[in-house]
Image: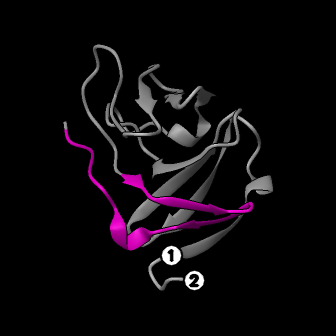
Amino acid sequence: MDKNWIAIGDISAIPLRGARCINTRQGKIAVFRTAENEVFAIEDHCPHKGGPLSQGIVHGTAVTCPLHNWVISLKTGKALGADQGAVRIIPVRNDEGALSIALENLMVAAE
């Protein structure tokens, strides 16, 4: 495994349309699993008021913040609709269910 990829567990530990949190030196990361078994990782705070995105509702490839219903794209980290703002996305690798993230490669979504 490449040195910049960090193993975070198996996909089965994340419920369908749910999330799991990982605490890192760079902050809390939310790892989401969609109904189609896609996996995404983003910062676990809404760009609006810092709500815990990991506790939001996953629909398609987006999550709705539980505090004020902002919808955040899991692919881009950007707020969707009329809202503006973004969270960082973290690259995820799914190797037959074994998940890894690349913490050194945090990408900032362009606003």
Quadrant in which the N terminus is drawn: bottom right
The image quarter containing residue 38 is: top right
Give the x, y percent position of residue 86.
30, 38
Residue that lies at the very extreme toward the top in this rendered image: 82
Numbered disc 2: secondary structure = loop
Closest to the observer, 66 or 3: 3
Residues at discs 2 and 1 in contact (Cβ within 8 Å): yes
Residue 52 shows which numbered tag? Answer: none
Would residue 32 appear left or right of 88 to someone viewing this image? right
Residue that lies at the very extreme toward the right in this rendered image: 12
Q: Which residue lies at the image location 47% right of the left edge and 38% below the top edge?
A: 74
Numbered disc 1: secondary structure = loop
- Above or below: residue 27 compared with residue 47: below
Q: Amino acid at mark 2?
A: Met
Please name the residue that numbered disc 2 is placed on. Answer: 1
Residue 5 shows which numbered tag? Answer: 1
Q: Which residue lies at the image location 58% right of the left edge and 31% below the top edge?
A: 56
Give the x, y percent position of residue 49.
35, 33
- Above or below: residue 2 compared with residue 12: below
Q: Which residue lies at the image location 47% right of the left edge and 85% below the top edge?
A: 3
The image quarter containing residue 21 is: bottom right
Quadrant in which the C terminus is drawn: top left
Circle 1 packing at 10 Å, graded few (<14), some (14-19), many (20+), is some
Q: Which residues are magenta?
A: 89-110
Q: Find out whether residue 97 is within the magenta segment.
A: yes
Q: Amino acid at mark 1?
A: Trp
